[in-house]
């Protein structure tokens, strides 16, 4: 049985990496923060009384599910927003009060594509790597971050992602090949390490 202090220490130890992972997945710092906070709350509420050795895998699974849920909600919202065109004012009624642009949160939409790569200095190796990681397909990025950022083994990564170990190996291999090619194209090679 783990204590509240142990849980607090665990959550502090994973918060920064979890935020980066969520930010890569959403390209939105506010959404990433919400996802990480919700994941931490779920872990504390549902699994806080479990053995501390179980928390890393449980947290990674909760975080993965929260990111997938966010993407599903975004698809639903996008579909709903395309239907907003039906609410345009009638052409024969110039006095109509409805304005679609006023109903949209344009500030959020305009900033959604801006991630940490615009804020970090591109001269640093980490910034270059982060920019390239963010371009990876979602499943490759998730496998890469779990294996090499979080340090999970193949079996743990497969458990967190809900797929086979072979799929994890394939996703990681493709991600590392893509990243290596992108870094070489930017002038990075083994000599820069």
Image (spheres, helix red, strand yellow):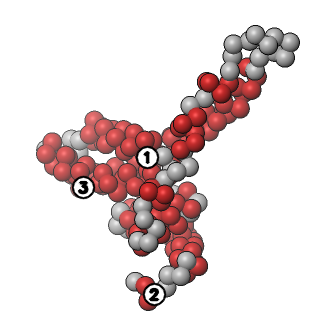
Residue 145's image quarter?
bottom left
Q: How far from the left and from the top, in percent, is residue 11?
A: 25, 49
Mark closest to the chain's N terminus, 1 or 2: 1
The answer to whether residue 123 is above or below residue 54 is below
- Secondary structure beneath label 3: helix
Q: How far from the left and from the top, in percent, is residue 82?
A: 71, 32
Q: Residue furthest front?
A: 95
Q: How far from the left and from the top, in percent, is residue 37?
A: 34, 41
Name the residue: 86% across, 12% down.
Answer: 92
Indicate the quadrant containing the N terminus: top left, top right, bottom left or bottom right: top left
The answer to whether residue 89 is above or below residue 2 is above
Q: Is residue 59 left or right of residue 123?
A: left
The residue wearing badge 2 is 190
- Dot 3 and dot 2 residues touching (CB under 8 Å): no
Mark closest to the chain's N terminus, 1 or 3: 3
**Front tag of 3 and 2:** 2
Checking the image for residue 29, the label placed there is: 1
- Secondary structure beneath label 1: helix
Mark closest to the chain's N terminus, 3 or 2: 3
Spatial separation of the CA atoms under disc 1 and disc 2? 32 Å
- Secondary structure beneath label 2: helix
Q: How far from the left and from the top, in percent, is residue 20?
A: 40, 55
Is residue 35 something one can see in this rendering? Answer: no
The residue wearing badge 3 is 13
Q: Is residue 94 left or right of residue 16?
A: right
Is residue 81 something one can see in this rendering? Answer: yes
Checking the image for residue 8, the label placed there is: none
Name the residue: 56% across, 31% down.
Answer: 105
């Amino acid at each position: 049985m783990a204590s509240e202090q142990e849980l607090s220490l665990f959550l502090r130890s994973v918060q920064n990496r979890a935020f980066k992972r969520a930010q890569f997945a959403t390209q939105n710092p506010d959404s990433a923060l919400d996802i990480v906070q919700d994941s931490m709350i779920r872990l504390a509420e549902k699994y806080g009384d479990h053995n501390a050795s179980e928390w890393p895998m449980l947290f990674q699974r909760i975080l993965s599910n929260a990111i997938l849920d966010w993407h599903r909600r975004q698809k639903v919202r996008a579909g709903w927003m395309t239907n907003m065109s039906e609410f345009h004012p009638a052409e024969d009624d110039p006095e109509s009060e409805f304005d679609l642009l006023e109903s949209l949160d344009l500030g959020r939409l305009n900033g959604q594509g801006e991630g940490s790569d615009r804020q970090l200095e591109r001269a640093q190796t980490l910034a270059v790597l982060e920019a390239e990681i963010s371009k990876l397909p979602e499943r490759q990025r998730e496998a890469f971050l779990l294996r090499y950022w979080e340090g999970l083994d193949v079996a743990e990564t497969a458990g967190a992602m809900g797929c086979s170990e072979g799929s994890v190996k394939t996703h990681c291999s493709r991600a590392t090949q893509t990243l290596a090619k992108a870094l070489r194209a930017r002038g990075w090679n083994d000599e820069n390490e």
